[in-house]
């Protein structure tokens, strides 16, 4: 075997080994993220709905990890609503569903849900979704649970208009 032939053979073997060991390319998921500006506009829509009905509430908006992005406490709201609004938003983001569903299930006898870590069986937490991805949630507290839910939904319903170019 000539020296050139040996080099060619070695090159072919090394190339084959490298190809066999190569892993297919791994891709990361593309993920939408809630921005402060969008959170402020969602809160403004919720706040407008509350003011139009003369309801003073706490508005909490969290990202998909349940971390507070925006917070507003209207004048005259009881201090107990601060933590409740935040917990409603966190629960809606964590479980990717409105907290109203937990309230309904408990009312129907599924009381075990009150022990669910991070659950919140009171209406007023609504997830924020874009293209099927939950990017955060709105939590409202200060009036009745049903009214809290309507205010939160008003903020989320404004999202398509907020995202228009």
Image: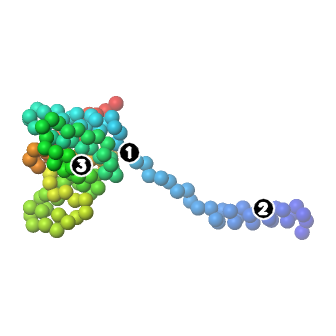
Q: Residue 34: image x %, image y %?
A: 34, 42
> Mark on residue 32?
1
From the viewer's perspective, is 130 left or right of 14? Answer: left
Q: Residue 54: image x %, image y %?
A: 8, 34
Relative to the observer, which residue lies in front, 21 or 105?
A: 105
SS class, disc 1: loop
Location of the C terminus (image quadrant):
top left
Cα distance between the residues tagged 2 and 1: 45 Å
Pointer 2: what residue?
Answer: 11
Identified at 9% across, 61% down, the residue is 107
> Mark on residue 86?
3
Give the quarter of the image for residue 164: top left
Q: Residue 19: image x %, image y %?
A: 66, 62
Q: How many marks?
A: 3
Q: Residue 49: image x %, image y %?
A: 14, 35
Identified at 24% across, 48% down, the residue is 86
Query: Sequence order check: which comes first, mark 2 or mark 3?
Result: 2
SS class, disc 3: helix
Question: Crowding at label 1, few (<14), some or many (≥20) Cα neighbours within 10 Å?
Answer: few
Query: Sequence order check: which comes first, mark 2 or mark 1?
Result: 2
From the viewer's perspective, is 158 left or right of 122? Answer: right
Judged by depth in the image, the label closer to the viewer, 3 or 1, is: 3
Judged by depth in the image, the label closer to the viewer, 2 or 3, is: 3
Judged by depth in the image, the label closer to the viewer, 2 or 1, is: 1
**Residue 125 drawn above or below residue 110:** above
CB of mark 2 within 8 Å of CB of mark 1?
no
């Amino acid at each position: 075997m000539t020296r050139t032939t040996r080099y060619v053979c070695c090159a072919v073997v090394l190339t084959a080994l490298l190809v066999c060991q190569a892993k297919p390319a791994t891709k990361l998921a593309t993920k939408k993220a809630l921005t402060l500006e969008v959170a402020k506009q969602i809160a403004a829509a919720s706040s407008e709905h509350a003011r139009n009905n003369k309801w003073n509430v706490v508005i909490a908006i969290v990202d998909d990890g349940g971390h507070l992005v925006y917070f507003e406490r209207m004048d005259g709201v009881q201090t107990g609503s601060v933590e409740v609004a935040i917990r409603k938003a966190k629960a809606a983001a964590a479980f990717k569903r409105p907290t109203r569903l937990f309230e309904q299930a408990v009312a129907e006898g599924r009381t075990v849900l009150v022990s669910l870590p991070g659950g919140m069986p009171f209406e007023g937490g609504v997830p924020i979704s874009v293209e099927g991805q939950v990017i955060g949630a709105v939590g409202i507290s200060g009036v009745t649970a049903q009214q809290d839910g309507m205010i939160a939904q008003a903020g989320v319903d404004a999202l398509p208009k907020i995202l228009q170019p």
